[in-house]
């Protein structure tokens, strides 16, 4: 039997000890400790002492049994938890198995990082190809700028495109700068017909004054030269659809009618109080406020 490190002496049995003398109580205490340590009960020859010792040793014996039962249950639960299903000794993984799992997890993470790097390189390559295509297209547009024979009959073929770009870049300084290209020249030609006498400076000044188009109100940042030159956007700009809202007029103060100034003849008031006017001619009219 496994012995616990401590045992309990219940207060309910204290009355038995109080009936003993100090010498007898000392013998009881020694006998209890001997039983707790070796599990043997020593006969003292004193009936009172032996009776009290029997009571305490029975209580301690029950405590030992409960302790051992608890230890056995805990041991069985531990074996159940760690035993393998096939009945092998333990289900705990060995150090080698744990190291193997760590290596496998490490390889998985390395593979994921490698996939991420490959995806990143693929994305960069696509972006590079996209930029190369755009640059190539811009070069082709620039190379064909000199060929405007098909616009010889157009009334807009004498436009100074560089001045339009310079006007936009200087006035709309908050936006992306515009450079010369064939598509932009065509857009400028179409815009001149829609502006109907309005200069590009006036157009760009209106755009720059708009908090929405410049992004100053924080709602939108997509405005640029190409966006402005689109016919549907150009018409909205000139119609004032993107102008800043007018400030609200302050409401007028509430109307208060002017105070009427009334003057009194003190002598007449005194006559009213004292009825001195009764003998005067026309006192009824004065009394009731009748004029004429």
Image (cartoon, grey):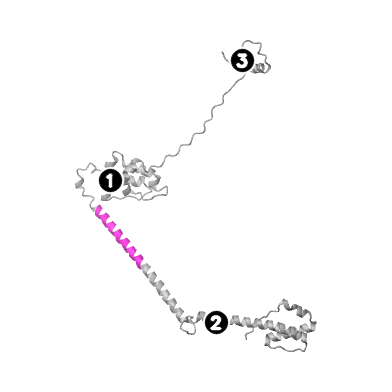
> Percent position (x, y) of residue 31?
73, 86
Residue 285 in percent (x, y) is at 60, 14
Check the picture and name the quadrant holding the C terminus.
top right
Q: Mostly what secondary structure, the magenta segment?
A: helix
**Residue 286, which numbered label?**
3
Q: Give the residues in magenta.
A: 118-141
Sequence-wise first label, 3 or 2: 2
Earlier-in-chain disc, 1 versus 2:
2
Secondary structure beneath dot 1 equals: helix
Question: Residue 8 lies in what quarter of the image?
Answer: bottom right
Q: Nearer the viewer, residue 120 or 156?
A: 120
Q: State which tag comes first along the sequence, 1 or 3.
A: 1
* 173 sits to left or right of 45: left
**Circle 1 is placed at which residue position?**
188
47 inside magenta stretch:
no
Residue that numbered label 2 is attached to: 76
For the N terminus, the image quarter is: bottom right
For the residue labelled by badge 2, is the local secondary structure a helix, a strand or a loop? helix
């Amino acid at each position: 039997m496994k012995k616990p490190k401590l045992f309990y002496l219940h207060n309910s049995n204290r009355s038995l000890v109080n009936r003993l003398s100090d010498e007898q109580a000392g013998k009881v205490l020694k006998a209890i400790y001997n039983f707790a340590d070796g599990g043997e009960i020593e006969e003292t020859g004193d009936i009172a002492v032996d009776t009290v010792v029997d009571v305490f040793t029975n209580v301690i014996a029950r405590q030992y049994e409960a302790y051992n039962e608890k230890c056995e249950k805990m041991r069985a639960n531990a074996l159940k938890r760690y035993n393998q299903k096939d009945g092998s000794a333990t289900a705990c993984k060995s150090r080698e198995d744990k190291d193997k799992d760590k290596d496998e997890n490490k390889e998985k993470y390395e593979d994921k990082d490698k996939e991420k790097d490959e995806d990143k390189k693929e994305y960069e390559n696509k972006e590079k190809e996209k930029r190369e295509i755009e640059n190539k297209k811009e070069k082709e547009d620039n190379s064909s700028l000199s060929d405007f024979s098909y616009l010889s009959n157009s009334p807009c073929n004498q436009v100074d495109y560089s001045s339009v770009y310079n006007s936009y870049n200087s006035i709309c300084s908050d936006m992306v700068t515009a450079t010369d290209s064939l598509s932009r020249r065509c857009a400028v030609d179409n815009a001149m017909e829609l502006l109907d006498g309005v200069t590009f400076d006036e157009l760009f000044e209106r755009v720059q004054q708009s908090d929405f188009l410049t992004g100053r109100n924080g709602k939108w940042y997509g405005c640029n030269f190409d966006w402005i030159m689109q016919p549907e956007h150009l018409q909205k700009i000139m119609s004032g659809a993107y102008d800043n809202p007018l400030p609200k007029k302050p409401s007028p103060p509430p109307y208060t009618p002017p105070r009427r100034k009334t003057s009194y003849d003190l002598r007449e008031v005194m006559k009213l109080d004292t009825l001195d006017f009764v003998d005067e001619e026309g006192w009824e009219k004065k009394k009731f406020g009748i004029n004429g």
